Amino acid sequence: MANPPLQVFIIGGTGLIGSALLGMMVKNKENGIGVVTTVVGYCNSKKGVKLVEDKEETVAWTEEICFDDSFVDSCASGDGPICIADCTASESVSDKYPSWLAKGWHIATPNKKCNSGPLERFNQCLEASQTGGGKWYVEATIGAGLPVVSTMRTLTSTGDSIHSVQGIFSGTMSFLFNTWDGTSPFSQIVSEAKKAGYTEPDPRDDLNGMDVARKVVIAARESGLMISLEDVSVESLVPKTLVGCSADEFMAKFHENDSLLADLSSKAAADGNVLRFVGAVDVPSKKAEVKLAAFPKSHPFAGLSGADNILEIKSERYGPLGSSTPLIIRGPGAGAQVTAAGVYGDIIALASSKL
């Protein structure tokens, strides 16, 4: 007898990533593509939706009725394992991970808050996964759908030792420095990117480096270095004088920083280099940082285009220690479709494993 299908409940199912994931799963089920999985429901902050025989039953949240485990149970049948696809960036949802894993529910998510957050909660998740049987899949937390986490886990599980991970982890910062050649004001490039939708509504959320720092923490932990966000040295591109102002005021005054960045660009160019905004972790020295750095034009980071991400992994096998070149992973690292595909890939991996 075939095992019952994995029952997937999507949190944030009406957001960009969640709705893309829902669309992929429904379409593939209709076309008979891939491992059989079933979306049993989804929710957002205002409502929950049960999917019953391809029909939607909507429940509006009130003070008396809100999202909790019992709602997920009401969507699922008692026959198959449950997977929570957390497509939010919520801390409060992340707080539920340990209890879900402890009761045997599985999690697939692009949400970085838990595997880059407090070590106590992170360790609770690892322990709950071991004792409760729930599996925690996080491929999409670095590089959207790129095979970053799975590659690192393959290296370590086969006996390799990761020494360093360096990369351009942010699609936005990649786009900015791939586009800017130093001849125009950097603030102008930021303004144009904001209008085109390449940055967050408040570009400081990209320029301050904290999103990259979270990914550096994840890379460090996957390499065996148990650090926290506070351990990462972050070089923010947001001037201290503009940290506390409104987004509009920031955009109006950011040009005051143009001369500093122009000088850095000119110096890099004089040395035959280009500027890139990178995150890096060095495992032996236990050092993690986010910074603006110069790279030779022959370096893989210099040849990047668009909003692609790129990571360079050096280990016992890959890089100078292994008499080899470093391992390079490159491709689209942002966007709802590719991120949803990364989450969907984890769901397929879960459904294909012996749960």
Image (tube, grey):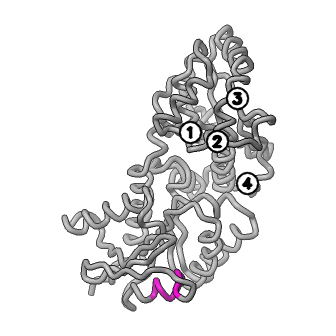
- Looking at the rendered structure, the kind of residue marked 4 is Leu
Q: CA distance from mark 2 to mark 3?
A: 35 Å
Of mark 3 and mark 1, the one earlier in the sequence is 3
Question: Where is residue 253 shown, x and y percent of the image?
Answer: 70, 29
Residue 206's place in the image compared with 3, above or below, is above
Q: Quadrant of residue 53?
A: bottom left
Q: Mark 2 = which residue?
A: 165
Q: Residue at the location (25% across, 68% down)?
A: 29
Residue 52's place in the image compared with 165, above or below, is below
Question: Where is residue 271 shown, x and y percent of the image?
Answer: 68, 10
Badge 2: residue crowd in 10 Å (few <14, some 14–19, many ≥20): many
- Looking at the rendered structure, the kind of residue marked 1 is Leu
Q: Mark 3 = which residue?
A: 253
Q: Residue at the location (44% across, 53% down)?
A: 339
Q: How many numbered markers are drawn?
A: 4
- Looking at the rendered structure, the kind of residue marked 2 is Val
Badge 3: residue crowd in 10 Å (few <14, some 14–19, many ≥20): few
Q: Are the residues tagged 2 and 1 within 8 Å (C-beta)?
A: yes
Badge 1: residue crowd in 10 Å (few <14, some 14–19, many ≥20): many
Q: Are the residues tagged 3 and 4 within 8 Å (C-beta)?
A: no
Q: Quadrant of residue 298?
A: top right
Q: Nearer the viewer, residue 271 or 71?
A: 71
Q: CA distance from mark 3 to mark 1?
A: 33 Å
Q: Mark 4 = which residue?
A: 225
Q: CA distance from mark 2 to mark 4?
A: 11 Å
Q: Which region of the structure is painted magenta?
A: 65-73
Split into 4 quadrants, where in the image is the N terminus? bottom left
Q: Dot 1: what SS?
A: strand
Q: Dot 3: what SS?
A: helix
Of mark 2 and mark 1, the one earlier in the sequence is 2
Q: Are the residues tagged 4 and 1 within 8 Å (C-beta)?
A: no
